Amino acid sequence: VQTCALPICVKHLPGHGRGAADPHLQLPVINASLGELETDFYPFQQLNNAPMGMVAHIILSAVDAKNPATCSAKVIKNIIRRKISFNGLLVSDAIVMKALHGTVAERAARCLAAGCDVVCLGNADFAANSELCRSGLNMSDAALERLQAIHKIINKPLPPANYAHLQNKYCGRLKNIISYNYEYDATEVLGRLRKQENKEKSKC
């Protein structure tokens, strides 16, 4: 990785400092006013030209009292994109955390619909990875451009072969899924799904 003046990824937007709960276990709620939150936004405003940022599973009741930042279009559009003026790639915090509810695919869909560019699955099992692969979630063109910009920064452009899965029947663009567990990256998951299908076909 090449040395650069800015960190590759800043987190957790728009600020975890006032949270009194662990999002791995439950959803933190911050009831501070927008005026009080100005100090929380300040560090991110100073780093708003970083190429990548991670969004927090945390409720800012002054902006959106129902949805965590990762699933809130209000927080992402009005605070992260406008107030903080962050224009880099936005990745969700790990969607397997207990701060979120619903199936893995439902969580991912809400994050992407709210404005996250990609979702971080986290250290999930094969079943969760398979569910995402079958979900049909897509990455936007704008998100793809931001992702490509990051690969240029770290001097590791994605070779064309890495995009072969764009045509697979499980997910239009699996590169919008990030998994901590290398055993279950997109290529591995698709390979195992295909093996399962071949076994089922051979039984017929």
Image: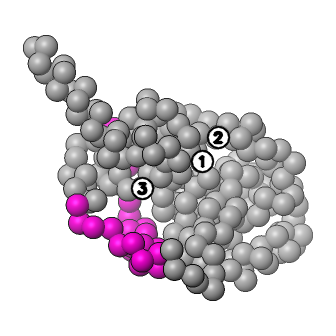
Q: Is residue 54 left or right of residue 168?
A: right
Q: CA distance from mark 1 to mark 3?
A: 13 Å
Q: Which residue is mark 3?
A: 176
Q: Pointer 3: residues within 10 angstroms few (<14), some, or many (20+)? A: many
Callouts 1 and 2 close, C-beta under 8 Å: yes
Q: Secondary structure at mark 2?
A: loop
Q: Which residue is mark 1?
A: 94
Q: Pointer 1: residues within 10 angstroms few (<14), some, or many (20+)? A: many
Q: Secondary structure at mark 1?
A: strand
Q: CA distance from mark 1 to mark 2?
A: 6 Å
Of mark 2 and mark 3, the one earlier in the sequence is: 2
Residue 189 location, x and y as percent? 35, 39
Q: Amino acid at mark 2?
A: Met
Q: Secondary structure at mark 3?
A: helix
Q: Amino acid at mark 3?
A: Asn
Q: Quadrant of residue 170?
A: top left
Q: Which quadrant is home to the C terminus?
A: top left
Q: CA distance from mark 2 to mark 3?
A: 18 Å
Residue located 55% across and 65% down the image:
90
Q: Which residue is mark 2?
A: 97
Q: Is residue 109 visible?
A: no
Of mark 1 and mark 3, the one earlier in the sequence is: 1
Q: Pointer 2: residues within 10 angstroms few (<14), some, or many (20+)? A: some
Residue range highlighted in magenta? 134-161
Q: Quadrant of residue 4?
A: bottom right
Residue 26 location, x and y as percent? 75, 38
Residue 16 location, x and y as percent? 78, 58
Q: Within the magenta stretch, is there residue 159? A: yes
Residue located 72% across and 75% down the image:
44
Q: Is residue 119 left or right of residue 57?
A: left
Measured along the vertical axis of the image, is residue 2 above or below residue 70?
A: below
Measured along the vertical axis of the image, is residue 152 above or below residue 159?
A: below
